[in-house]
Amino acid sequence: MGLFDSLNTGMRGLSAAQQSIDVTGQNISNGNTEGYSRKRVNQAADVVRDDVYGERGMGVSVTEIDRIRNTFLDRQTWEQVGEKGYNTEVDTAYTRMENILREPTENGLSAQLNKFWASWQDLANNPADLSARESVKASATTMIDTFNNVYKQIEAYGLSMNNPLSQKAKTVNDLTAQIYSLNEKIAGAETSQGQKANDTRDQRDLLVRKLAGLIDVQTIEDQQGRCIVTSGGNLIVGPSDVQKLETYGVDKMLSDGTKSSELRLRFSASYRHFEPRSGELKGVMDARNNVLAAYQEDLNSLTSAIVKQVNEVHMAGFNLNRVSGVHFFDPDKTQAGNMALSDAILAGAENIAAAEGGKITDVVTLVPKPLVPNALTPTLDLKQIQSYYRDLTKDSMQINLVDGAGNPTALLAEGAGKDYIVDYEMGTVTFLNYARYASGDQVNINFSYNTTGFSGNGNGANSLAIAGLRLKATMSPDSNGTNTQSINSFYAATIGKLGIEKNQNASQLETKEFLIAQMDAEQASISGVSLDEEMTNMIKFENSYRASARFISTVSSMMDILMSVGQ
Amino acid sequence: MSSRISFGQISSHILDRLFMNYNKLEGIQSQLASGKKVEKGSDDPVSASMSLGLRSDLDQYGSFQRNVSDGLAYLGTVDSTVSSANSVYQSLRERAIQASNDTNSAESRYFIGREVRGMFDQMVALSNTSFKGEFVFSGTNSQVAPFEMRSGVSKVVNAPPALSGNINYNAGVPMTLIDKSVTDSKDTITGAANPALVVPGSLRVNGLTEGADYTVDYVRGQITFTSANATAAVAANTADITYEWVRRNENDLDGVINREIEEGVKARINTTASEVFGSKTQANGAFESMINLLEGTLNNKPDKIRTSIDGLDAALKRQLGAQSSNGARVLRLESTQARNDERLVYTTKLQSEVEDVDFAKAISEFNLQQTVYEASLKMGAQALQSSLVDFL
């Protein structure tokens, strides 16, 4: 062992201290770099075999530069990041739904529904009044417009999701391509033991985390250090290739009859359908296929109940033209998106059936009836002349006897023992006293009968019946088929459901965010750069550098001494 | 427990807390600005759904209040009409009693008759009272007048056809009048009408005299030709009869008009013509009695006057019945109105409790959150300030 060896030992100390200072510098510089993990220089004492001592120190050597990071924690974080991405997208959809429905406000659907029912109440007060009829028509039109508008906004929102879907699919492709190229870089750099592509790994972890926010991600590292990524059981980033995603359109029929395209995901090479299990992409697709669709369906059941119930009652009533059986809403358009007034109502408000059918009296004169009362056919059944000639008005019967020339000769008397008796309920006349009739005599019959029909413009009972549908249980049948909800309470329940679902999702989102923050804090406490620590290290390494230099200068003066001995 | 705390950890932690506090602050600020606790369904799903129900209830109470006040106005119209009818009946009865006195000469009875005719017309007008353009005594057939004064024309001919609406002559037998002037079939009356309630004093037959040539049953609308003159007039085709008659609408005038005054509770508000003036089938109808009185006074027939007094008594009783049941309806609606008012107040209060912000509470919470936010800002600023670098 000579002085040169000592010089060498000093030099190694210098070099190790310098490398450590370098790494400290790197740590300090990257203190704010996203995804950066602090590095640490691992040193080991160099030894050589010595015949006398067995082993002798040869200074220090840097064995490796370590990346300090808990990769297990990373994997857990990625999973939560995916869930968070999912909940975030769904939350956006719920928020949008709330904004579209705008409840509870003065202009939302429930307000329009209330105005619609109230207008029927007002019509019941003034059934013959055209302005009250116009107001029913106007409030119905506003309600229909609101339904149409709300439904179309939801529909448009669903279609607008095509955009984020294709953008996010592009981002996935971008990320997987980058991961693949970093994989190659890492595999190339880490060819032998101890060589570590630390900063590239940091970058790759950051990319995988971003990818995990979009789709579910499972990773395995192969022997060359490549990160193999699978998602939903599909290989996305393989050792030698990347599976690219693409979007494809599926035809979708809209409520206004036009066709549009709804995007889905597939692999561009195999055309195989891809369904992510979490992440923003799943969030977007679930928001569209479940959240929006469910509320569209609720709105549709609401409108079809309104159309069906109102039409049913409306058809039973009579309008100002004395006609019943008229639809109020177009019976073929029961969806929230296409609901419309019927043509008859559009043609005129007088076709609104405010009146209930009632008993009315019609007057009939059968003149002259070629009938000779005789003992063979004593009974004249008026029902056989017209089936509705029954339920005659009491005491309305008046029978004139007419001679062969058609001249009235006498008014016949009603009553037992007189000329004829009448069964008013059955609509039959039985002639008695045949002796008084001469050959060729005929009768001339006048009577009124009761029938069901238009009961007058002043009748608003049907309008009231329609207003009563507001709180009548007509929806959501239970297991016995008994309806449990009215149109209004169904809508209130829908709004309540939306709020509850949104809050559930929001609280899940909050939990995920909290978890991620915790995990990030844990990771930061392991791999984050602490300036205080780095400063302490810097002083430490600076001192060690200074000491090594001092050692070299000591050895150097020792060599000087030795040299002077030789002179 | 981790002992290492890095700079980034502290800064992200501080930011997280700041955001959280700021979010809370924003939530309360938004409540204070709108004055509503529940702006969106998700603010409080149960309250939101309850608030929708309450709004619907309030709306409905509003409808009921409108129904009730409309009903009260209707009842008021009926009440004033029925009271007017009452005073007309009273005057008619006075005149009838006056006229029934046998000291009256035919002439003085005639003058009473002229007066009665005026009251008769007034009664027809009263029966046609309308509310917002609808006849109040016509039941649900409110577009048609219950009683209508018409001028009738009938022609008596000697030969068929009977279908043309002419009356076939039959001497000595009561012939039912056929009013040829009635042509409308809109009110479900088909063909020409058989007039009843012919007004005494208005019937004229060309060149013939009542009593000498013909007799009339005014209430039933039947005429009987009794003289040779009459036969000659028919043969000469000049037997045209002109008269005025009160047409009682043939439609069902007994329809009930209701107003929904509370949930599921319907109250009747109308009074029908039969209830005030008597129906077609009832004896002692108001118009029948007045026609008897008119005939008795104008044609000096004391027995008809006496019959009419009985009829008027019955009519008066009937009218008082109608007036008192109308009064009972007014009371019912008024008490419901008071109840609905109370309900409106309670429900509005409940809605406010569900929807509106408790300002005192919200403001104190706002102050608290503001303090917390400011504290976290200050703490963050100080914690991030120092590091070992400052001391080297």
Image: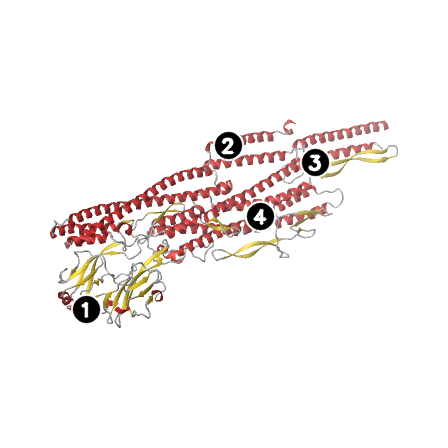
Image quadrant assignment for residue A74: top right
Instruction: Provide residue B314's location: percent of width, then percent of height.
Output: 24, 49
Residue indicated by mark 4: A283
Label 1 secondary element: loop
**Type of amino acid at the residue the image marks with label 2:** Glu
B11 to B177, vertically: above or below: above
Label 1 environment density (alpha carbons within 10 Å; few <14, some 14–19, many ≥20)? some
Instruction: Provide residue A249's location: percent of width, then percent of height.
Output: 56, 56
Image quadrant assignment for residue A556: top right
In depth, the one of A263 and A375 nearer the eye is: A375
In depth, the one of A543 and A455 nearer the eye is: A455
Q: Is residue A59 left or right of residue B171?
A: right
Q: Are marks 3 and 1 in contact (CB under 8 Å)?
A: no
Q: Which numbered circle lies on residue B158?
A: 1
**Marks 4, 2 in one chain:** no
**Marks 4, 3 in one chain:** yes
Q: Chain of mark 1?
A: B
Label 2 secondary element: helix
Quarter placement of the N terminus of chain B: top right
Q: Chain of mark 3?
A: A
**Type of amino acid at the residue the image marks with label 1:** Asn
Q: Residue furthest bottom?
A: A439
The answer, for residue B314, to whether it is visible in the render is yes
Q: Nearer the viewer, mark 2 or mark 3?
A: 2
Label 3 secondary element: helix
Residue indicated by mark 2: B365
Label 4 environment density (alpha carbons within 10 Å; few <14, some 14–19, many ≥20)? many
Q: Residue furthest right?
A: A51
Q: Which numbered circle lies on residue A22?
A: 3
Label 4 secondary element: helix
Mark 2 or mark 1: name the one nearer the start of the chain.
Answer: 1
Q: Chain of mark 4?
A: A
